[in-house]
Amino acid sequence: MAPVPWPMEGGNAGRTRTTTESIQPPLTAQERFEVGGDTRFVSPIALAAELLVADGDRRLHAFDLTNSQEIWRVVLPGSYLSPTIAGDSVYIRVESGEEGFLIALDRSTGEERWNYRFPAVGSAFGDIGGHVTAPSVVGEQLFVGAAQTLNAFDIHTGTILWQFSTDEPLAASVAVANNIVYLADFTHLYAVDQRSGVELWRFEHDTMTLFFAPVVTEQAVIVADQATIYALTQSDGHPLWQRRFDQEIIPAAASSDHVYVKTVNHLWALDPTNGDIVWDYQAQNFVSLPAVTAEQLYIITRSDGGSQLRALRRTDGMEIWQTDNQSFGNSAPVATHGTVYVRTVNGSIVGYRP
């Protein structure tokens, strides 16, 4: 089977963090890429074809997967890079102070093709909301928002195709599926027509959870409001089901059999048809967003003075494998090319394979 790419944050435009690839443990560390610097708080990597792109220490690095060699690097005046690979370009978001940019780079050389400076970034609520969102590419369109505006760009030229204004500052990156763009501000989830930018519907609640994109399943769009998870119909935003937890929750991933949600150290698998809990997994201190493969979930955990890469069985959440204590960062694992890629806190990306 050809590798399933993981070209953007969340693995795909629906942000499901799921691949059809089978990567069976036990795994061993078999390749390493070095970006250097402090990488405790960095973006997930992006991979497509034979290219791996990762940020580190205000630089963006591109590596050839066939030989692990660095192809190019660029220095940028900012952070929050969230690389996305599409066609012959790499797209990144950059923030520095009160300025925010979307930049398109040549995937072969790293040379800039075009850039767009957002007229406003952030919000009146300090560091909360309104930041430049992670790029999402579907077809010939690229979706990125900042402040209270979502922009649809032509991926080749950077021309704005349409804009959509929200009532409040944007609170998370967008998810796209079935010609609908889903985006959240502080108190609404909006569904917008992908081609025209026309609002289709909105769902309103007290306070949507910040900083985590909606997740789109086959049946619904999954969003969080503080301690409550909602599954909404894609056609009109009508709630299919909801489940309340005893602490703030975020949508983490989705597969054909489960919706995954998490807190800081607790992960649940829910039935996608009714929200019933199928299984749960609790870590000592921290559990990352998962990378969901055909049979397993791969997660980063923190416990016993270190961090670990673990494999959970998809059907029942049973832990079936783990590494020894390592120095992994909090960034979610990425599963593609028969490999689970994880980031360390000190500038490395490690590929684990059977």
Image: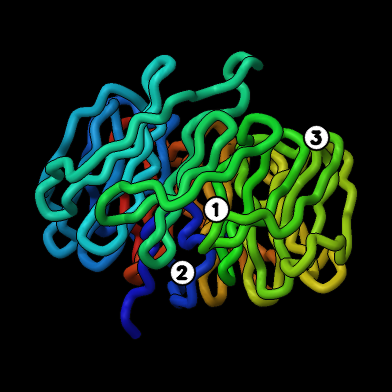
Q: Who comes first in sequence, dot 3 or dot 2?
A: 2
Cα distance in 3D space between marks 2 and 1: 13 Å
Tell me what residue is drawn at x 15 percent, y 57 percent.
Answer: 64
The amino acid marked with disc number 3 is Thr
**Residue type, label 1:** Ile
Q: Compare residues 141 and 279 and report the one nearer the observer.
A: 141
Mark yes or no: residue 226 visible: yes
Determine which of the numbered discs, if any, sits on residue 189 in the image.
none
Q: Residue drawn at (12%, 60%), measured in percent from left and top?
A: 67
How far apart are the two marked residues, 3 and 2, measured between alpha carbons? 40 Å
Q: Position of residue 252 (x, y in %)?
A: 64, 53
Identify the secondary structure beneath mark 3: loop
Q: Would you place residue 109 above or below residue 49 in this image?
A: above
For residue 207, which numbered disc appears in the image? 3
Q: Residue 338's spot in the image, x, y percent?
A: 35, 71
Circle nearer the N terminus (2, 1): 2
Residue 311 seen:
no
Can you identify the residue that label 2 sits on? 25
- Locate the N terminus and report the quarter of the image it occupies: bottom left
Circle 2 packing at 10 Å, graded few (<14), some (14-19), many (20+), is some
Marks 3 and 2: which is nearer the front? 3
Cβ atoms under marks 3 and 2 closer than 8 Å: no
Name the amino acid, label 2: Pro
Which element carries disc 2, helix, strand or loop? loop
Q: Nearer the viewer, mark 2 or mark 1?
A: 1
Q: Residue furthest bottom?
A: 1
Residue at the spot x=80%, y=38% of the render?
Answer: 226
Mark number, residue 299: 1
Provide the secondary structure element on which disc 1 rests. Answer: strand
Considering only order in the chain, which callout, 3 or 1, is on the residue closer to the N terminus? 3
Q: Is residue 330 left or right of residue 313?
A: left
